[in-house]
Image (cartoon, rainbow, N blue to C red):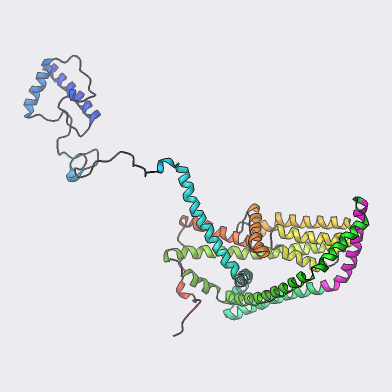
Amino acid sequence: MLKRASHLAGRARERIRAAGEADPHGWHRHHADHPDAAPEAGLDDAADEADEADDDVQGAPGPPLGSPEPGAPDLDGPIGPGGVSGPPGDRPPRDRRRPRRPVGDDSVPSGLRTAAAWSWRLIVVLVGAYVLLYAAAYVAVVVVPVIVALLLAALLQPGAAALVRRGWPHALAAFAMLLVGLGVVAGIITLVVNRFIDGFADLSEQVTAGLEQVRDYVVDTFPVTERQLDDAIEQAQGFFTGNSDELASGAIDTAATVGEVFTGIVLALFTLFFFLKDGRSIWLWLVGLFPSDARAYVDEAARRAWRTLISYTRATVIVALVDAIGIGVGLAILGVPLVIPLSALVFLGAFIPIIGSFLAGSVAVLVALVSVGPVKALIALAVVILVMQVEGHILQPLLLGRAVHVHPLAVVLAIASGLLIAGIFGALIAVPIVACANVAGTYLARRNDGPRPPEPRPDRGKPAVGIRG
């Protein structure tokens, strides 16, 4: 009896193993029905008869020992409908075959399809940017003064805000800061023009003497005779004399440009006043044009860009003053004429980082060369290089810091692109545009990393066009 019980237990374990390897939800009457079951050695007909007798005792053929009964809950896996073990009967069988590719895709590599998808989107973006730049160039008489007013507002707005906090009305604070800005600019222009007029006679004499020294140096050093130099000068004079008509038309164009400049100055001052007075209100109206879910993020990005622009303009003015004073003091010690006009030129050139200071300093060195000789010109060049090194390694990192951190390569590429697109004005605004776009774009790309910014109030904004009831 004990031997028979051991034999039945072994048969049950073997059937459980075979059923688990095949299908846990399938029913196998005998281990030989399973394709992976190996023939059992040592089992005879008596064991088979004992197995049949055991089935008769249970009452009816059933699952192997250890298998779940039909309809029993599945305790180890997902429960189907009705709490019955196994996959639900109404779920269609999964199609494990790979999805069939569209006809014709087999001949196009996936990398080429990805490149094509990126290419046409990039083309659309470039066309949109070109159309935007073309439209801006068409109305440049309006766009340029608005941009200039925005830059000046970034410089004067902190002063106007301070006056408002002291109880001044917005209009009066804006008008006061506008007068301060006009007074500073008018004073600088008057000083530069007067000093240029006073020193022009001395400069002309020094330039004549310097040119004679340069001619003597060229004749002594290079295989060139004085006669050849005189012929070149006469040809240059003949060129200007023979093209008087073109020069006259150029003068007319210059007069038209002067008219446009005057119009732009008036428009810039008018726009600057309202930027100082109603800048926040105007922006609230603009941000109200965006979708409601994006207004908070757009407003926060604009706030950060505006703070960056304020830091940039303030630091640039300080750097320009240091450059102008440093180079001006060096030129004055060397006895170079027109120190104040040259210092003013250096001040304006410093608004174009890296390139502007170098070009303005080169003009100062050339004036020193033709006025006080090559030795002092070399000393003036050393002064310019020293001031530029102080600017690049001390002033800009100290004043701008992390708020306006732009790599020098990005600065040079931005200035070059600005020169190609909009000339000198493009070079002036290229770096602040890149700095503000960098700050705003970085924030928008990581906007979900921090808490949601406060919601703006577009209802407090003043619309550009309104209807009075």
Q: Residue 280 versus residue 255: which sits nearer the camera?
A: 255
Along the horizontal axis of the image, is 378 left or right of 354? right
The boundaries of the magenta stretch are 195-220
Q: Is residue 351 above or below residue 282?
A: above
Q: Residue 88 versus residue 221: which sits nearer the camera?
A: 221
Pick the quarter of the image with the C terminus. Answer: bottom left
Pick the quarter of the image with the N terminus. Answer: top left
Q: Position of residue 444 (x, y in %)?
A: 50, 58
Along the horizontal axis of the image, is 267 left or right of 98? right
Residue 282, can we see it?
yes
Q: Position of residue 237 (x, y in %)?
A: 85, 65
Along the horizontal axis of the image, is 223 left or right of 325? right
Q: Position of residue 250 (x, y in %)?
A: 74, 71
Q: Does the magenta run of residues contain 445?
A: no
Looking at this view, name the residue that lies furthest to the bottom: 469
Please report the residue visible at 67 percent of the width from the left and 78 percent of the height from the top.
Answer: 179
Q: Residue 443 versus residue 249: which sits nearer the camera?
A: 249
Q: Is residue 228 above or below residue 70?
A: below
Along the horizontal axis of the image, is 358 left or right of 155? right
Please report the residue visible at 74 percent of the width from the left and 54 percent of the height from the top.
Answer: 389
Q: Does the magenta run of residues contain 205?
A: yes
Please report the residue visible at 74 percent of the width from the left and 63 percent of the height from the top.
Answer: 322
Please report the residue visible at 58 percent of the width from the left and 80 percent of the height from the top.
Answer: 171
Magenta residues, dominant SS class = helix
Residue 188, can we see it?
no
Q: Position of residue 44 (x, y in %)?
A: 14, 14
Q: How many marks?
A: 0
Q: Residue 15 versus residue 431: which sits nearer the camera?
A: 431
